[in-house]
Amino acid sequence: METIAFQDSYPDELSHCFGCGRNNPQGHQLKSYWQGEQTIAHYTPDEKYTAIPGFVYGGLLASLIDCHGTGSAAAAAYQAEGRALGSLPALRFVTAALHVDYLAPTPMGVPLQLVGTILEVKAKKVVVDIQLTADGVVCAKGQVIAVKMPETMTLS
Amino acid sequence: METIAFQDSYPDELSHCFGCGRNNPQGHQLKSYWQGEQTIAHYTPDEKYTAIPGFVYGGLLASLIDCHGTGSAAAAAYQAEGRALGSLPALRFVTAALHVDYLAPTPMGVPLQLVGTILEVKAKKVVVDIQLTADGVVCAKGQVIAVKMPETMTLS
């Protein structure tokens, strides 16, 4: 399995995403990796991403689930095509639908872990389930339906 | 109908949310209002909230839908109880489930409009549908299932 983060294999022009782009210095710069047949990412929120004092803002959790989902979708699509991660032409996915169930308040100040399970891989659509835990407690479960990025989204 | 933003009626200690808290200077400070029987909010994203250059990051859209949803839920709950917005004890809602369908790429640089429709109001649960438009085009549709904030989320 590759040790480069999925998001670090994106072409430069597709690496500006606030959630996961290495070329967005103000963003979250989420990094996702294979872990066996699942995918994994870690992120420790800054205190500004508060909901109620002591707990993490749900919008951030949705964002992390979203970016870990589309990153996992790209990696799964490369794998399904037997291609090396990041090889050209780039396989880049965007979110068609995002669902998040918030199961427990997410504590601030501890690393969050996101584990992705690839449910379905088709040529233009990948479905990923994601579990977000803090200190071993499952705080949120998400599902991302990712679709191959439409040509209309590239401006170059 | 009230002209104060729902989020500006929250007590100080519940106003730190990155998405909508007036006491979070680094956050989005989303403001939601009644518009007839629906709720409305506007937000123009900063360019750092990019997905692919030219388009808004889906995680931000999920965040705005989330905060407009929980704000609308609180306002609807006050209305259902015949109480003035912001009167004590505070009615504050958190998200149990968030669903977003991304229908079209959301262009950067234009004001986004969120319109909420209250689908269901029960004592501890409110369901809100939200439509997000940019330049009159529906870019995303969301649903927020909001539940009354559990006592365990207040640290004071």
Image (cartoon, coloured by chain):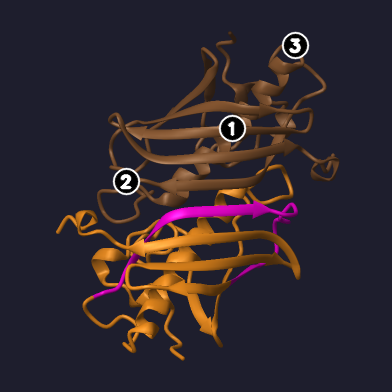
Chain colours: A orange, B brown
Say which residue appears at 36% left-offset and 33% top-offset.
Answer: B133
The image shows residue A7, relative to residue B136, as above or below, that is below
Whether residue A94 appears in magenta in the rendering, the answer is yes
Chain that bears disc 1: B
x then y, percent, for residue B56: 35, 47
Residue B112 - label: none
- Label 2 to label 1, Cα distance in Å? 21 Å
Res. A35 in view: yes
Q: Earlier in the sequence, mark 3 or mark 1?
A: 3
Number of residues whose C-alpha sits closer than 10 Å to that of mark 1, classed few (under 14), some (14–19) or many (20 or more):
many
- Label 3 to label 2, Cα distance in Å? 38 Å
Determine whether, in the image, residue A80 is placed left or right of residue A141: left
Which quadrant holds the C terminus of chain B?
top right
Say which residue appears at 39% left-offset and 60% top-offset.
Answer: A25
x then y, percent, for residue B61: 45, 44
Whether residue B56 appears in magenta in the rendering, the answer is no
- Please name whichever residue, B46 or B88, is drawn nearer the observer in this view of the structure: B88
Name the residue that disc number 3 marks: B82
Name the residue that disc number 2 marks: B104
Q: Earlier in the sequence, mark 2 or mark 1?
A: 2
Name the residue that disc number 1 marks: B128
